[in-house]
Amino acid sequence: MKIVISLITCLICHFSFSQVALGFPEYNVVYRGYDNKIKIGAGAETAFLDLESDQAQIYRTDSCFILKPHASAKTITVIARNFKDKNVVGTWQFRVLNLPTPTVFWGVSPAGSPVVTLDKVNLRVGYDDNSILENPGFEVVNYQVNSPLIATPLPLITGGAITQEVIDALTKAKTVNKGKPVEFNVTLQVKGRDGLIRKMTAEYTY
């Protein structure tokens, strides 16, 4: 009996969300449309627990649970049950928020930095390598490149691939500017897993 009680206590004490509250002070946040990871404490396994919620989809992996809030949910209640006897061992409530504002990357160059290369790159929208939010799933719907040194306005381009037309326009602009850095901006429409279409602007130099 002592062993069972100790195990349940361990699970309760070490139950935690591993990917939460980016940019928020509380640790009671999960993100809409995102695979929020729920990890069990060291020495325990997901096989010992069942998690359930009426406001979210929850499924088990070998190392953690994945929680995906329903699109309309603003708060969710998660109930943990002992897998063997189905007794409730814990209940938690979490706020559901849209994903934090992401960063636009031109290849590997984040917004506000110099562009390293024009060739064979894509616009990407997400978070930097130090973020706890992995694979957020943002999709570039379309984009447009603008600069005072580009004489003929470039068209709206579907997707995130940097086209030859864009490469030629920026290369010509740098030539016109006698090799000096060219300042330009990119306006984008970005679709997130949280269902939002974000209008974003990123500034670069080339």
Image (cartoon, rainbow, N blue to C red):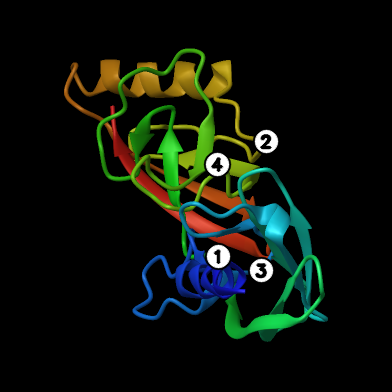
Cβ atoms under marks 1 and 3 closer than 8 Å:
yes
The mark nearer the N terminus, 3 or 4, is 3
Question: x%, y% of residue 31?
Answer: 60, 68
Q: Taking 136 as reference, is 184 above or below it?
A: above
Comparing labels 3 and 4, the label whose residue is closer to the camera: 3
Amino acid type for the residue under numbered disc 1: Leu
Local secondary structure at mark 2:
loop
- Give the CA distance from mark 1 to mark 2: 21 Å
Q: Mark number for residue 189?
A: none
> Image point 71% across, 46% down: which residue?
61
Q: Quadrant of the C terminus?
A: top left
Corner quadrant of residue 99: bottom right
Residue 181 is at least partly visible in this image: yes
Amino acid carrying label 3: it is: Arg
Who is closer to the viewer here, 36 or 169? 36
Q: Which residue is mark 3?
A: 32
Q: Amino acid at mark 2?
A: Gly
Whole-percent x and y of residue 193? 69, 57
Mark 4 in CB contact with mark 2 (< 8 angstroms) = no
Image position of 22 (left or right of 39): left
Secondary element at tag 1:
loop
In percent of the image, x 55 and y 73: which residue is there? 2
The span from disc 3 to disc 4 (Cα, nearest Å) is 28 Å
Amino acid at circle 4: Gln
Residue 9 left/right relative to 88: left
Q: Which residue is mark 4?
A: 144
